[in-house]
Image: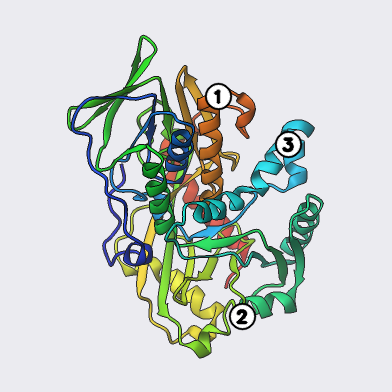
Amino acid sequence: MYPVPFPLSPSLWAATASAAPATGKLEQNLQTDVIVIGGGYAGLSTALHLAQRGVSVALFEAREIGFGASGRNGGQVIPGLKYDPDDLLKMFGKERGARVIDFAGKTADSVFDLIKAHHMDVPHVRHGWIQGAHSDAALKIANQRAEQWSRYGASVRFLDKTQVAALLGTERYLGGWVDARAGAVQPLSYVRGLAKAAIDAGAKVFTESPIQSLSSQNGQWSVHLASGVKATADRVVMCTNAYDSNLWPGLKPTIIDANTFQVATPPLPEEIRRTILPQGHVCSDTRNLLLYFRLDHAGRLLMGGRGPFREPKGPEDWAHLERVLKKMFPQAAGQPFEYRWCGRVAVTRDFLPHIHEPAPGLLIDIGCMGRGVGLQTSMGRALAEYVATGNADALPFEPRPIKPLPLYGLRRIYVNAVVTWYRLNDGGL
């Protein structure tokens, strides 16, 4: 379990989110059909879709809804995966690859469809995502990505330097591509909206309920809570991602739990606001240590990127993002910074989400790679269908064995080495 990050201030999302639904702790032993562990996008989407199928489901969150990455991320809803369609076909073969491409291409739809269907109180926009190319090599890749996704009917197009500058409000990129399927949400409001929808559908949601152990006996699974009570079920779905993945042996060493940092200004003055992302796009770039930025629903400018692997110690740990923002958008250089926050993301060795089924009745989902809002919402729906029906084709990825990263105990050393190498190759800003 990770500590609460350095409390300079609440995150922007915590300060502006819609109210969370009423939840509480489990007070007495419980029997249910399915137990879901983790109150983020994947867990709540799983619980919601199971409850809609009439399955009895109880979800347990160690802290509060959205405490982990689901309540701390940049709120960008980007379809696709880290790999382009042609790469996915090579990796998975024609049949499975086509299914993965179809799944990945619709992940943003899952989010916006749920917001609409459940009338969620979630500020959101859907004006597209721009990936800015920072080098000539990256510009060629951006052109290839636009061409490949267009073959699958996606509303995408390549952008030259002038077009990117006009849409972003900065001249720091050589070009890029735009994907109209994407958008943005207030991420904590959205995960709270998922919780409310799951509860309304009949799911039981328990917060401040850390699980001490997970065990099975005679075909039944039990979770033992720190309070001394337990819940029992036929199936367990574990969706803790980068937070508290110690419940199953060997799971935590399968990911790099990197820290991502963000800053936000106060709402920009109108004369500045209309010069930055004037059509409401969101953006991340092609750097290995990518930068991501957007305006929120009140016109605040957000900038995110990598920070120290450790938990932050003070405002200086966000200083690199503040410098970048002022260089990228000199028109906003005089604006103060109102919010600083961070959170863990789960990065797998192959940059794909992993599904594990290490024992009968136990299903584990882990790995977001920076696209968790849409990806994990869609994964929850797929996990629910698989659990409810047993149809293996419901899963976009086949369950795989749990394999720890090599030299996991030295991950901070080699991650820092890789970060240094990436910075040298990404070029300055």
Distance CA(mark 1)–CA(mark 3): 23 Å
Distance CA(mark 1)–CA(mark 2): 49 Å
Residue 338, relative to residue 107: is it above or below?
below
In x, y percent, where is residue 151?
82, 51
Q: Name the residue under label 3.
A: 97
Residue at image point 46% right, 87% down: 269
Looking at the picture, which amino acid does disc 2 mark?
Gly
Q: Name the residue under label 1.
A: 389
Evaluate if marks 1 and 3 touch, with contact meaning CB atoms under 8 Å apart: no
Whichever of callouts 1 and 3 sits on the residue coming sooner in the sequence is 3
Check disc 1: other Cα within 10 Å, few if <14, some if 14-19, many if 20+. few
In x, y percent, where is residue 136?
75, 66
| Mark 1 residue element | helix
- Of discs 1 and 3, which sits in the foreground? 1
Residue 183 seen: yes
Task: Identify the mark at residue 201; answer none if there is no mark.
Answer: none
Task: Identify the mark at residue 169; answer none if there is no mark.
Answer: 2
| Mark 3 residue element | helix
> Which corner quadrant of the image does residue 31 belong to?
top left
Give the number of callouts: 3
In x, y percent, where is residue 357?
50, 23
Q: In which quarter of the image is the C terminus?
A: bottom right
Evaluate if marks 1 and 2 touch, with contact meaning CB atoms under 8 Å apart: no
Q: In which quarter of the image is the N terminus?
A: top left
Residue 25, relative to residue 195: is it above or below?
above
- Front residue of 152/263: it is 152
Evaluate if marks 2 and 3 touch, with contact meaning CB atoms under 8 Å apart: no
Residue 418 seen: no
Distance CA(mark 2)–CA(mark 3): 37 Å
Looking at the picture, which amino acid does disc 3 mark?
Gly
Check disc 3: other Cα within 10 Å, few if <14, some if 14-19, many if 20+. many
Looking at the picture, which amino acid does disc 1 mark?
Thr
